[in-house]
Amino acid sequence: MLSQKIVDRINLQINREMYSAYLYMGMSAKMANDGYRGIATWMMTQYHEEMFHAMKLYAYLQSQGAQPVLAAIDAPDFSASTIKEVFVATLKHEQFVTASIRELLELALAEKDYATENLVRWYVDEQVEEEQNVLDILQTIDVMGEGKQGMFMLNVELGKRKPTIALDFTSMA
Ligand code: OFO
């Protein structure tokens, strides 16, 4: 059985993951509007990943007999005008999520809640991968420069991203 503290903190994390999804959806809209449909695809794939992150926590609460309580999701907050600025904002957001996951892990450890600890460690690994992905893209932008040709190539490259998670959330493990 989960403590109320853990339930509340997981509900907060669900909200943050939903916000992440919303943020990537907003970024996808901006990229598509700017003519970068490949980068928009990358962002929309990330949207699905974030929805998966939220639903994995949602399903965990339900598996433990606790009720997911949904709070309002803030409007996406980023004011980027260049592609590099979009990815800088992305990295900053992922670093915020990493800190949030660490906080949740520390709470699980303090509560000696080993089942939640196991679950949250999955997110710890996931955050390493997410930050790495964005750092790689930023490094590529720095190498190629922000000229039209470089951004065109980046757009083609990122457009190849395929979902790695089930898009049907009801079929996830
Ligand atoms: Fe981007 O990893 Fe969840 O939020």
Image (cartoon, helix red, strand yellow):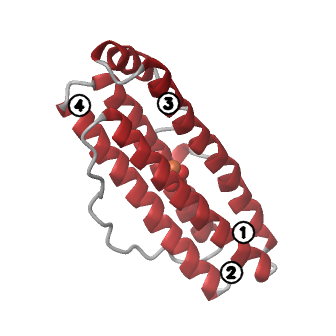
Q: Is mark 2 within 8 Å of ligand 1?
A: no
Task: Say which residue appears at 26% left-offset and 51% top-offset.
Answer: 79
Q: State the separation of the CA atoms marked 4 and 1.
A: 38 Å
Outermost residue toward the left? 33
- What label does residue 32 carry, if any? 4
Say whether disc 2 or disc 4 marks the residue closer to the N-terminus: 2
- Cα distance in 3D space between marks 4 and 3: 18 Å
* Mark found first going from the N terminus, 2 or 1: 2
Q: Is residue 165 visible?
A: no
Q: Is residue 143 left or right of residue 40?
A: right
Q: Secondary structure at mark 2?
A: loop
Of the numbered discs 2 and 3, the one sitting upstream in the chain is 2
Asked if residue 51 is positioned above or below residue 83 in the image, the reply reads below
Residue found 50% across the figure and 21% down from its top: 143
Residue 110: image x %, image y %? 77, 81
SS class, disc 4 = helix
Which is closer to the viewer, label 4 or label 1?
4
**Quarter occupied by residue 106:** bottom right
Disc 2 to disc 3, C-alpha distance: 39 Å
Q: Which numbered circle lies on residue 137?
A: 3
Name the spot of residue 12 as percent of width and height, x first: 49, 73
Say which amino acid is labelled 2. Answer: Leu
